């Protein structure tokens, strides 16, 4: 079952902000093991999502560079 925290961010920037906050919280070390694991898993999912957005942006740039000039 998904929770609101598991929702996909609306943009790459939102995902990066959330990922940075997760890193900050993990580095602070104030969470229980269970909370830390949940944060880690969310961070991993966000990192994968960010990479997909970056890969898509790269593909669009590559396609635009390969397109004939108008």
Image (cartoon, helix red, strand yellow):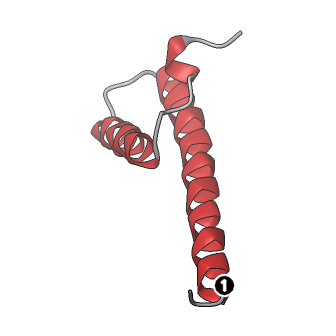
Residue at position x 38%, y 24% in the image = 31
- The answer to whether residue 36 is above or below residue 58 is above
Give the farthest residue toward the right: 1
Horizontal side of 66 relative to 13 (left or right) equals right
* The one of 46 and 10 positioned closer to us in this rendering: 10
Residue 59: % across, % down: 66, 71
Q: Quadrant of the C terminus?
A: bottom right
Q: Crowding near pointer 1: few (<14 within 10 Å), some, many (20+)?
A: few
For this view, does 25 lie left or right of residue 5?
Answer: left
Task: Judge left or right: residue 18 versus residue 10.
Answer: left
Q: Residue at x 57, y 65 (%)?
A: 57
Image coordinates for residue 49, horizontal then vertical, percent: 60, 47
The tally of labels here is 1
Q: Is residue 1 left or right of residue 49?
A: right
Q: Secondary structure at mark 1?
A: loop
39 and 8: which one is in front? Answer: 8
Query: Is any atom of residue 34 visible in this view?
Result: no
User: Can you identify the residue that label 1 sits on?
Assistant: 67
Name the quadrant of the N terminus: top right
Quadrant position of residue 67 = bottom right
């Amino acid at each position: 079952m998904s929770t609101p925290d598991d929702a996909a961010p609306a943009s790459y920037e939102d995902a990066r902000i959330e990922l940075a906050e997760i890193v900050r919280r993990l580095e602070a070390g104030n969470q229980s093991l269970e909370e830390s694991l949940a944060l880690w898993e969310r961070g991993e999912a966000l990192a994968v999502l960010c990479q997909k957005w970056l890969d898509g942006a790269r593909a669009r740039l590559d396609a635009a560079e390969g397109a004939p000039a108008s």
